[in-house]
Amino acid sequence: MDPNATFKQDSDQFIDDINNELFDDDLALVENVDSPFSIIFIETGGSEQKFIKEIDNLPRPIILLSNCKNNSLPACFEISTYCKKNKIRDIILFGEEGDIAHAIKTLSEVLTAKTNIEKSRLGVIGKPSDWLIASTVDYQEVKNKFGVELIDISTEELKEEIQKGVLKDIPHLSQLRTLEKRENVLEGALEIYSGLKRIIEKYHLNGFTLRCFDLLTEYKNTSCLAFGLLNEEGYIATCEGDVPSMLTMLFIKEALHAPSFQANPSKISLRESEILFAHCTVPLNMCKKYEFLTHFESDLGIGIRGTLENSDITICKISPNLKDLLCVKGTIKENLTLPNYCRTQIVVKMDNENLFEFLNTSFGNHILVTYGDHVDTLLGLFHFFVE
């Protein structure tokens, strides 16, 4: 048989096998299609000069695809080294066609998330709480690194929106009234929710972080219920003006299409390799069930006690200097109702390696928890933003 015909048949079959795996996800490898990244099939050795001639026309990052035949793989390594030398982000894919298809699907999702993050607008309502002494960020650096626009909004402007009263369409209103019998407290919490929703709409925000403790003095109420509802609706909503937590929640939402729980690491057992995470708010759609108590520190308003699934989780946080991402696995072992901690309380079991990484990473006083093992996806997404 003609060697050239065999070569073409092998190459065509390789691409067809990958596309058969991608078909159900509405993805396919086709030539000359607009895309936010490039997939380049390096069929043989000796392709390096052809690649250099085309490199200026290729969307970044560049994914180099090898079928491990005809010196394809060593050519990929040579090209990859050239890319790194010239600060061009690249990835080499090789192996079984099914594994390659899975990697392409994951990369497509991650790069779509990256694009969405770069278009995001987030509000900072009030300044970070006074105790967040290490969690301030440089707004321009956030814009330069992540493409995210941070917009300062005064607490006074939020108060003006709160004064306008409760919106007509409140999620779960009948259930909320069943759980909270203090009509004035529920009404006040829903006024805060409505004010925040108006701020989101006014500034076309993907979400916000709020210096929430300032509301306690003015309204004798909390934003905890508002956060629980807004996070369930798909908005980013974090406590205490914590911008790194807000950015981390954005990463989780765009990468995983999932909510996350902002919490304090409140107690650690080295003997059991366990951490108690607690906070007075949690997205309602992360809970098997929930009830309303008062806010822990103030004994005012509504604090949410949510019961979470005993399942694998990912614990993560972008560092305040924006250079690192804490991202480790854990498992929710049990939910507690201890009296001297914030209301939603989960005990998380970690292996020794992950606990060591947690204890030796600088991330501030909050972390984010989301269901499932998504360490590779989140680290992969963060990798595309960090030079």
Image (spheres, rainbow, N blue to C red):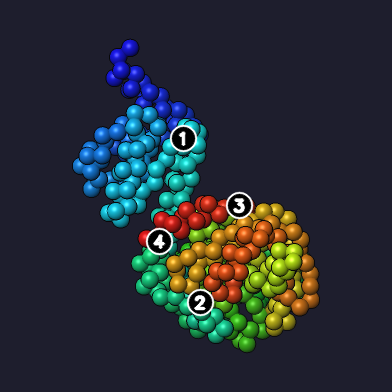
Distance between the Cα atoms at labels 3 and 1?
23 Å
Distance between the Cα atoms at labels 1 and 2?
42 Å
Which residue lies under the disc numbered 4?
Answer: 386
Q: Nearer the viewer, residue 357 or 11?
A: 357
Distance between the Cα atoms at labels 4 and 2?
19 Å
Q: Quadrant of residue 335?
A: bottom right
Q: Is residue 17 visible?
A: yes
Mark with earlier residue (1, 2) = 1
Kind of element beneath mark 1: loop
Give coordinates of residue 169: x percent, y percent: 60, 63
Q: Which label number is shown at residue 373?
A: 3
Kind of element beneath mark 4: loop
Q: How many residues crowd around disc 2 within 10 Å: few (fewer than 14), some, or many (20 or more)?
A: many
Give coordinates of residue 66: x percent, y percent: 38, 35
Q: Are marks 1 and 2 in contact (CB under 8 Å)?
A: no
Q: Is residue 202 visible?
A: no
Give coordinates of residue 326: x percent, y percent: 54, 64
Q: Is residue 127 above or below residue 378?
A: below
Q: Are marks 1 and 4 in contact (CB under 8 Å)?
A: no
Distance between the Cα atoms at labels 2 and 3?
26 Å
Kind of element beneath mark 3: loop
At label 1, which amino acid type do we have? Gly
At label 3, which amino acid type do we have? Asp
At label 2, which amino acid type do we have? Ser
**Residue under the image location 37 percent in, 36 percent down:** 73
Q: Are marks 3 and 1 in contact (CB under 8 Å)?
A: no
